[in-house]
Image (cartoon, helix red, strand yellow):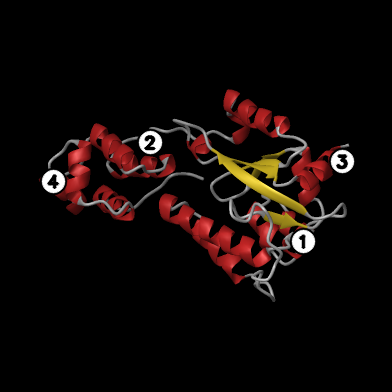
């Protein structure tokens, strides 16, 4: 996705400041400029220097793709390159090492729009029986999970898991303003919800720790926890938007099933 903008840089700065719920005084002190100067930038009476754009973006934790948009709006060339996933070199090797090393537990890597970049063999088992309609490239992991023709019929705690996923995407949209996320969220919210709530489901030892993914399989019910890993200090747009989702067994039974499925 290319970075373009038709809005003035001041509008973008103000939007990100308000998105982060920061006052002009707070941001100006942290970025080492006067409140008056920041006000002039936001209202278009002053144009920020290249270094000022950098300082404001760092202070407001603006994603790299949107930082490029601010540089363009201020009249400068974009700073952060955007390579294809296949061209990320050592970073791609690191992702794939994590995925492979995590077997027999499932793991996958996605971009900011939840499109699948890579997955290990264990993850392929879970996605393999979803309808072709929801797994066509680019495969969107959340669509494949919550779509009626995807994995939703196998999720034992669908109401709980669906609510968790929707909250997560809403928070992600608020934090990143990534293109395509609003449309994905609206699509996910439009899927029919579960006919029954999960309020009466059997409690498990891990319910007080995290929201588990409880998934039916031909080998029995699986209970999974997950962690999310991102790269520290990325300079490339693609790398900045990659998240590695690694799933772990929540109990000994699930661990045994995952080991058996890998044989």
Quote the CA–CA distance across marks 4 and 3: 62 Å
For marks 4 and 2, give the one nearer the viewer. 4
Residue 96 location, x and y as percent? 67, 31
Judging by the rendered image, the residue that carries numbered circle 3 is 260
Pick out the residue farthest to the top.
Answer: 90
Secondary structure of the residue carrying tag 3 is helix
Is residue 159 shown above or below 218? below
Pick out the residue farthest to the bottom.
Answer: 195
In primary-sequence order, the first of circles 2 and 1 is 2
In primary-sequence order, the first of circles 3 and 2 is 2
Judging by the rendered image, the residue that carries numbered circle 4 is 35
What residue is at 37 percent from the left and 41 percent from the top? 67
Quote the CA–CA distance across marks 3 and 1: 19 Å
Q: Is residue 177 left or right of residue 119?
A: left
Judging by the rendered image, the residue that carries numbered circle 1 is 154
Give the numbered dot on residue 73: none
What residue is at 66 percent from the left and 69 percent from the top? 198
Quote the CA–CA distance across marks 4 and 1: 55 Å
In primary-sequence order, the first of circles 4 and 1 is 4
Viewport quadrant of the C terminus: top right
What residue is at 36 percent from the left and 42 percent from the top? 61
For marks 4 and 3, give the one nearer the viewer. 3
Judging by the rendered image, the residue that carries numbered circle 2 is 78
In primary-sequence order, the first of circles 4 and 2 is 4
């Amino acid at each position: 996705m290319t970075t373009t903008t038709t809005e003035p840089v001041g509008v973008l700065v103000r939007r990100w400041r308000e998105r982060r719920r920061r006052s002009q005084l707070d941001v100006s002190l942290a970025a080492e400029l006067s409140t008056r100067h920041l006000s002039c930038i936001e209202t278009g009476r002053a144009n920020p220097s290249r270094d000022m754009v950098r300082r404001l973006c760092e202070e407001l934790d603006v994603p790299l793709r949107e930082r490029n948009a601010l540089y363009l709006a201020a009249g400068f060339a974009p700073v952060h390159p955007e390579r294809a996933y296949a061209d990320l070199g050592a970073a791609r090797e690191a992702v794939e090492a994590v995925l492979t090393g995590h077997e027999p537990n499932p793991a996958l890597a996605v971009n900011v729009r939840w499109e699948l970049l890579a997955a290990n063999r264990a993850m392929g088992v879970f996605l393999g029986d979803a309808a072709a309609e929801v797994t066509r490239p680019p495969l969107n992991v959340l669509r494949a999970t919550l779509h009626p023709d995807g994995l939703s019929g196998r999720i034992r705690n669908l109401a709980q898991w669906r609510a968790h996923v929707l909250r997560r995407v809403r928070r992600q949209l608020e934090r990143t303003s990534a293109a395509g996320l609003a449309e994905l969220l609206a699509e996910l919210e439009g899927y029919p919800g579960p006919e029954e709530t999960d309020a009466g489901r059997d409690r498990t030892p891990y319910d007080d720790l995290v929201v588990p993914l409880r998934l039916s399989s031909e080998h029995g019910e699986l209970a999974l926890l997950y962690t999310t890993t991102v790269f520290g200090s990325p300079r490339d747009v693609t790398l900045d938007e990659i998240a590695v989702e690694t799933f772990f067994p929540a109990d000994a039974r699930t661990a045994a099933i995952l080991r058996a499925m890998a044989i």
